Image (tube, grey):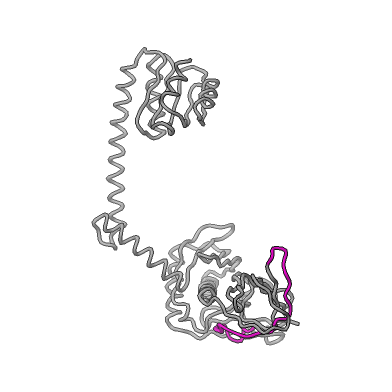
Amino acid sequence: METKKLYYDDPFLREFTAKVLSCEETADGKYAVVLDRTAFYPEGGGQGADHGTMGLVHVLDVHEKGGVITHLCDGAFEPGETVRGALDWARRFDHMQQHSGEHICSGLICERFHCDNVGFHMGADVVTIDFNADITWDALMEIERRANAYLCEDHEIDIRFYRGAELEQVEYRSKKPLDGDVRIVSFPGADCCACCGTHVRRSGQVGIVKFLSCQKFRDGVRIELLCGARAYRHLGETWEQNLRVAQSLSAKPTESAAAVERLEAELGALKLRAARLEAQVFSQVAARLAGEGDVVLFEEEMSPESVRKLCDAVMNTCGGRCAVFAGRDGAWKYAVGQTGGDLRELVKSLNAALNGRGGGKPFFAQGSAGCTRKEIEDFFAKL
């Protein structure tokens, strides 16, 4: 006996009563419950399953097979018992906003670029849609403007089942040929698509749509989309963050990007000047240690690139092996070099003795060491 799907009769139904047909314990201690009818939507078509409660029992997941809908619950029922189901409405309405918004956007994109929606996933955070066409970000922004205008016009959505000759008269999107009773979800002027999911009644109930990204994927693009409350929250959080950035840069929120560009230019100039000064200092150190033979240098925190440059400068003048350690006890960056030398065994011993990791060429190696300065000094003293 197939389960009566109340969510098709009324997608806004939040509570219902039903008779328990069966209840079987699963291998992981949950219970698979079948009802004679349900408002819980099972996972399918890219849309996640509804959650909620049946009395004091939680509905954790919902699946359909052969027309029978099974509710995975954390408690048991007696067959024949009447239960009252209550949906997690925030989850259901979010899913309807995402799904309806995706249809509208996909319909407009497929019409504009004569392409297909070849992938759809409604994640917990974002909706992803794959298209087999090369779509630019500017073109996608035009679709976003059209989609939001469509939402504001508050069109009524038409959902009905078609079959046979009647179905042949309908132009609709589908990833595969269909027969029998086919459920067609129509957003007049935007999309017409075969779909088994739940949707809002009017386009205005989607609220807003916002594209987040458009990246190359296989033979087309993958688009990230937010609809409804998700989009509103994202835009609010983004605005708050932008406001804080603008305030820290003493700029207007609408001018934060220009302020960041100025800051980056200033930072780039400072980095260039610092690099030149650093090179001068390293040259002075190399000149001071000319002819000293093997040397070990300890410095304050420096970037790996600076450690490399200092070691390279000194090893070319000291006439022996140069080892540079920068940082603090427990967290050192190192570079070891010797012109024409072979340091492979030394570096292997160094890593073993000083809790280090690293390597490189026979005459030059870089890495890190988790030890104390005294342990470093003792290691080289023994050499």
- Residue drawn where x is 48% and y is 84% of the image: 155
**Is 116 part of what is drawn in magenta?**
no
Q: Position of residue 87 (x, y in %)?
A: 56, 78
Residue extent of the magenta highlight: 5-29
Q: Position of residue 342 (x, y in %)?
A: 52, 18
In front of the other: 84 or 200: 84
Locate the N terminus by quadrant: bottom right
Would you identify the image quadrant in which residue 40 lies? bottom right
Q: Residue furthest left?
A: 250
Is residue 157 at all visible to an observer of this figure? yes
Count of numbered circles in the view: 0
Viewed as shown, does residue 139 lie left or right of 265?
A: right
Q: Residue furthest right?
A: 1
- Residue drawn where x is 55% and y is 82% of the image: 14
Please say if 7 is above or below 352.
Answer: below
Please say if 127 is above or below 188.
Answer: above
Is residue 111 at all visible to an observer of this figure? no
- Residue drawn where x is 52% and y is 77% of the image: 89
Viewed as shown, does residue 148 lie left or right of 102?
A: left
Please say if 344 is above or below 216.
Answer: above
Viewed as shown, does residue 77 lie left or right of 294?
A: right
Q: Position of residue 241 (x, y in %)?
A: 35, 60
Please say if 24 is above or below 359.
Answer: below
**Is 24 part of what is drawn in magenta?**
yes
Q: Position of residue 369 (x, y in %)?
A: 47, 30
